Image (cartoon, rainbow, N blue to C red):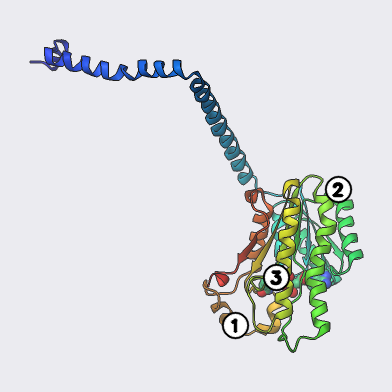
Amino acid sequence: MQEGEHVGQPNVCLKLHNLYLFLHMCMPIPLLLLFLQRHPEAVHAEENRGIQMSYALGVSRIVQERQHDRLRVSTMTGNVAVITGGTSGIGKATAQLFVRAGAKVVICGRNQDRGQEVISELKAMNGDALFVKADVSKAAEVESLIETTVSTNGRLDYAANIAGIGAYATTVDCTEKLWDLMMRVNVKSMWLSMKYEIPHILKQGGAIVNMSSITGLVGIIGQPAYAASKHAIIGLTKTAALEYAKQGIRINAICPGSILTPMQDPVINGNPEIAARIGARHPIGRMGTAEECAAAIHWLCSDAASFVTGCAMTVDGGYVAQ
Ligand SMILES: NC(=O)c1ccc[n+]([C@@H]2O[C@H](COP(=O)([O-])OP(=O)(O)OC[C@H]3O[C@@H](n4cnc5c(N)ncnc54)[C@H](OP(=O)(O)O)[C@@H]3O)[C@@H](O)[C@H]2O)c1
C-alpha cells in the first residue's frame, strides 16, 4: 500500500480522533467570547496592553538603535573640551585621546614651557589645541580659562578636571601650610572649575569628569591631607551630579590606583623595583598607565555612558576591591 492511499482514505477511528481535536481547539473561543461579553472593560484592557507592549517594544528598539549609533560614532568631533592639568601625566594623555577622538581641546597648567611643548605634540597629531596658563586654585584664573575656551571655540561640551598635587606627611607631621595648599589645589579648584564650566555646558549638555583617587575611597597611611582632599572631590562630584542630572550634564569622578606619571617620580626615583613593589599592591599586579585613565575619562564623557552620573569609578587594577 502506498502512503498517499492511507491519507486519502482515513478510517473511522481517525475521523473520530480528528473531530475530538477540532472540538478541543474550538472550545476556548466561545468561552472567551462569553467572558468578553460579560466584561467589556477586558477588551479595552487587552487593547491597551497591546498598545503599551508595542509602544514599549518600539521605544526600546529606537533607544537601542540610537545607542548603537552613538557607540558607532563615539567620537568628539565638533565638541570642545577643557582639560585642567593637561600639561603632564594623566591630563596630557587625556588631551591626546580627546584630540584623537576629534575634540578641540584647551589645556591648562602653571608651567608655560611644558604647556607649549604639549600643544606642539597635539598639533603634530593634527589636533586643534590651545594652552592657557592658569592656576586652578585661583578663581580669576579659572574664570579666565573657561572664558578663553568658549570665546575661542564657541562652546564647551566636556571638562576633565585633572589638575592636582600629592604629598606625604602623617597626620601629626602635616603642616597647616601643606594642609591649606592641598585643599586649595585639589578641592577648591574642583569647585571653581565646575562653577565656571557648568553655565556653558548647560547650553547644549555634556559631561564633566573630576579627578579623585583610590585615596578618595580608602585611607592611605602618610597621606591624610591628600586623602581628605580626594574624598571631598567625590562629595562635590555627587552633589553637582544631582544638581544637574535633569539638565543634560553628567558629572562623575574617577579614582585611579597608582599610575606611572611624573607625580610618582619622587617615590619611584627611577627604580623599577619600587615601581614593581607598588604595582604588586594592585591585584592586576602592576601600576596603571595615564592612557588607561584617559580611556576611562573618554568613556565617561561619551554617550556610551549616557546613564552614568554621580559615580566614583575606580581605575585601579582591583585595588579597592581587596
Ligand atoms: N599618578 C597617580 O598615581 C595618581 C593616582 C590617583 C590620582 N591621581 C591624580 O591625577 C591627577 C593628575 O596627576 P598625574 O599623575 O598626571 O600628575 P602630574 O604628571 O604631576 O600632573 C599634574 C598636573 O596638574 C597640574 N597642576 C598642578 N597644580 C596645578 C595648579 N595649581 N594649577 C594648574 N595646574 C596644576 C600640573 O601642571 P603644572 O605643573 O604646569 O601646573 C600637571 O599638568 C592629580 O589630581 C592626581 O592627584 C594621580
Residue type for callout 1: Pro
Q: CA distance from mark 3 to mark 2?
A: 34 Å
Marks 2, 1: nearer the viewer: 2
220 vs 236: above or below: below
Check the image and name the residue furthest to the left.
1
Where ligand 1 lies, by image quadrant? bottom right
Q: Position of residue 83 (x, y in %)?
A: 77, 61
Check the image and name the residue furthest to the bottom.
173
Name the quadrant containing residue 38: top left
**Residues tagged 2 and 1 counted as in contact (Cβ below 8 A):** no
Q: Quick one: SS at disc 3?
A: helix
Front-most of 149 and 245? 245
Q: CA distance from mark 1 to mark 3?
A: 30 Å
Report which residue position mark 3 lands on: 231
Crowding at dot 2, Cα within 10 Å, few <14 / some 14-19 / many 20+, comes out as: few
Q: Quick one: SS at disc 1?
A: helix
Q: CA distance from mark 2 to mark 1?
A: 45 Å
Report which residue position mark 2 lands on: 154
Q: Position of residue 294 (x, y in %)?
A: 67, 62
The label shown at residue 187 is none
Relative to 305, 187 lies left or right: right
251 vs 246: above or below: below
Front-most of 241 and 207? 241
First along the sequence among labels 1 and 3: 3
- Label 2 beta carbon within 8 A of ligand 1: no
Relative to 251, 65 lies left or right: left
The residue depicted at 76 percent of the width and 46 percent of the height is: 247
Report which residue position mark 1 lands on: 272
Q: Is residue 100 visible?
A: yes
Front-most of 128 and 241? 241
98 vs 270: above or below: above
